[in-house]
Amino acid sequence: MIKRVLPPSIPLLAVIALMEVAVRQGWVASYLVPTPTAILKAMVESRVELAEAFLKTSAGALLGFALSTVGGISAAVLLSSSRTIQRSFYPYAVFFQTVPIIAMAPLLVIWFGYGMRTVVASAFVVSIFPVIANTLTGLLSTDPALRDLFQLYGASRRVTLFKLRFPAALPQILTGLRIASGLAVIGAIVGEFIGGQGLGSVVDVARTQQRVDKVFAAVLLASVLGLALFGLINLISAITLRRWHASEQS
């Protein structure tokens, strides 16, 4: 445990100490970058507001991530079933990756109104493409010899999907979920900038009040949420792949 925690902790503590010294010595203006102690003080003073905002952002990001997981895997399964379907519809999946979410956010407010639905929709739109792309790559990368073997024994398409193609694609699916987990938090924050509530709203209000310490506190909590989601996917990966995949056996 110590061997895993210590290496990333050293540069983190060094950066925190450097920030504290740099601001206190006047090398960096405090209205641009607050000291870590000022950020901690802001978190304590606004703990109730930040806690409520954190829970709202967590709910929006988790719902959006769950929808992108289910929708992305389902879409990838459909796309992998036929080259014609893939050529016809995959370009529209790329649309979710190419259109900036900040440009779509006002439309989401028009369509879904202010509040949680816009936040969830924003998180969903941002995070679905990595799930589709990685799942599709995994499903299409199944060993041809194993596919022929299943066909030789008369396995149906459903059996082949759940017994062969889906398990073989699991490492790629989890890679897509790792990427999507962080993007879901980003999408939720952007949705909150436009649709209100959550950490995004706290950041926006604190910015207008020139409370840079509070902005950093809210951003830090958003980062913690993203790391927690990422860690959850890593835990699922360790449980499901530990016994048979090289990526979890080191």
Image (tube, rainbow, N blue to C red):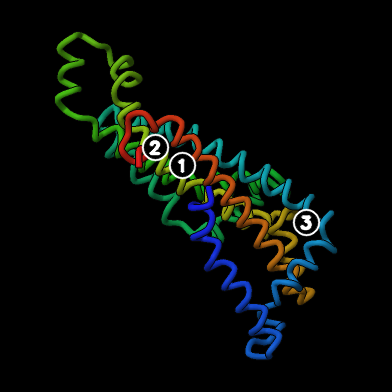
**Tag 2: residue type?**
Ile
Q: Which residue is mark 2?
A: 173
**Residue 63 appears left or right of 167:** right
Residue found at x 30% / y 39%: 137
Q: CA distance from mark 3 to mark 1?
A: 27 Å
Looking at the image, tell me whether mark 2 or mark 3 is earlier in sequence order: 3
Query: Residue 112 location in percent, x, y?
Result: 66, 45
**Tag 1: residue type?**
Leu
Residue found at x 85% / y 64%: 45
Q: Which residue is mark 1?
A: 177
- SS class of the residue under badge 2? helix
**Crowding near pointer 3: few (<14 within 10 Å), some, many (20+)?**
many
Image disc number at residue 50: 3
- SS class of the residue under badge 1? helix
- Residue lying furthest front: 2
Q: Is residue 192 above or below residue 31?
A: above
